[in-house]
Image: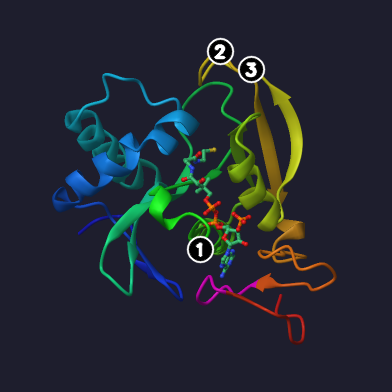
Amino acid sequence: MSACPTLVTDRLILRPFTESDLDAYFEVMTTPEVRSSLQVPEMFAPVNAWMGMAAWLGQWELRGSGQWALEERSSGRMVGRAGLNRPPWPDWPGLEVGWALHPECWGLGYATEAGARAIDFAFEALGADEVVSVILAENERSQKVARRLGFELADERTRSFFLDLPHGIWKLPRIRWGQSVDPLGTAGTELVPVSAGGALRRPGPPHR
Ligand SMILES: CC(C)(COP(=O)(O)OP(=O)(O)OC[C@H]1O[C@@H](n2cnc3c(N)ncnc32)[C@H](O)[C@@H]1OP(=O)(O)O)[C@@H](O)C(=O)NCCC(=O)NCCS
């Protein structure tokens, strides 16, 4: 049995990667849009996608954190990955929440939905005090997801772990968990993550 739990949100299943995800995951990682955002090298081959999936499963085993494969509930299609990451780089800033989706699924709120569930997992199941997101300065779409989820930019510089480019360290401390998330940019309307399902709803009485 995998150390990676399976979680369900309104529209997604967050589950361990399986061997049968390889073609779909390779396709996600080599679409021009994802390639460019993540600086995926030209030589990236199916074996690299396979090793990536294995590394996520391995991190779950070794550290109890990792990214999930995202399955669209309505279609059963594997549409990308999202979740947690804490590799042992000396200057890695903490428990990271990240996301990558097939461009055909951009603009649907899937990254925000999966990100909200991953954040709930980090605070509830892992007892984190803070989560971070490491985002290249030019990656505006990813920054928008982070903002929707309540992250704030804390620092921006080049570090040892990823490329020779400045990236932002976005932070969400436990104390701000669940406050003022606005996934659709609806001015003046506060929406909050629902810890049970990772979906987003307008708030009733405070739930945490
Ligand atoms: C980063 C990435 C995951 C963002 O995807 P995204 O589709 O923009 O983000 P979401 O899934 O949260 O969707 C948000 C959009 O869906 C819309 N939306 C529709 N229904 C929604 C809902 N129910 N909830 C939230 N947003 C919804 C939002 O208005 C927003 O629209 P906008 O693009 O016009 O601002 C995607 O661009 C990606 O995979 N990039 C390549 C990999 C990458 O860069 N990863 C991050 C590395 S740091």
Q: Which residue is pictured at 66% across the width and 29% down the height?
A: 137
Q: Which residue is mark 2?
A: 164
In the picture, the quarter occupied by the N terminus is bottom left
Give the mark, 3 or 2, whose residue is nearer the N terminus: 3
Image position of 200 (left or right of 40): right
| Amino acid type for the residue under numbered disc 3 | Thr
Dot 1 falls on a residue whose secondary structure is: loop
Question: Pointer 2 and pointer 1: residues touching (CB < 8 Å)?
Answer: no
- Residue 146 shown left or right of residue 55 in the figure: right
Name above or below for residue 196 compared with residue 6. Answer: below
Q: Assess whether residue 196 is covered by the magenta stretch.
A: yes
How far apart marks 2 and 1 lie (CA) works out to 31 Å
Query: Callout 3 environment at 10 Å: few (<14), some (14 to 19), or many (20+)?
Result: few
Q: Say if 73 sits above or below 162 in the image.
A: below
Q: CA distance from mark 3 to mark 1?
A: 31 Å
The reply, left or right, for residue 133 in relation to residue 47 is right
* Labels 3 and 2 touching (C-beta < 8 A): yes
Residue at figure coordinates x 76%, y 65% from the top left:
179
In whole angstroms, how far apart are the C-alphas of marks 3 and 2?
6 Å
Q: Nearer the viewer, mark 2 or mark 1?
A: 1
Residue 87 at what x, y percent from top left?
45, 32
Q: Which secondary structure, mark 3? A: loop
What residue is disc 3 on? Answer: 158
Alpha-carbon neighbours of circle 2 within 10 Å: few (<14), some, or many (≥20)? Answer: few
Q: Nearer the viewer, residue 5 or 183?
A: 183
Q: Can residue 101 be seen in the rendering of this structure?
A: yes
Residue range in magenta is 193-199
Task: Report the residue marked by disc 1.
Answer: 108
Q: What's the residue at 71%, 55% (across, down)?
A: 150
Above or below for 101 versus 156: below
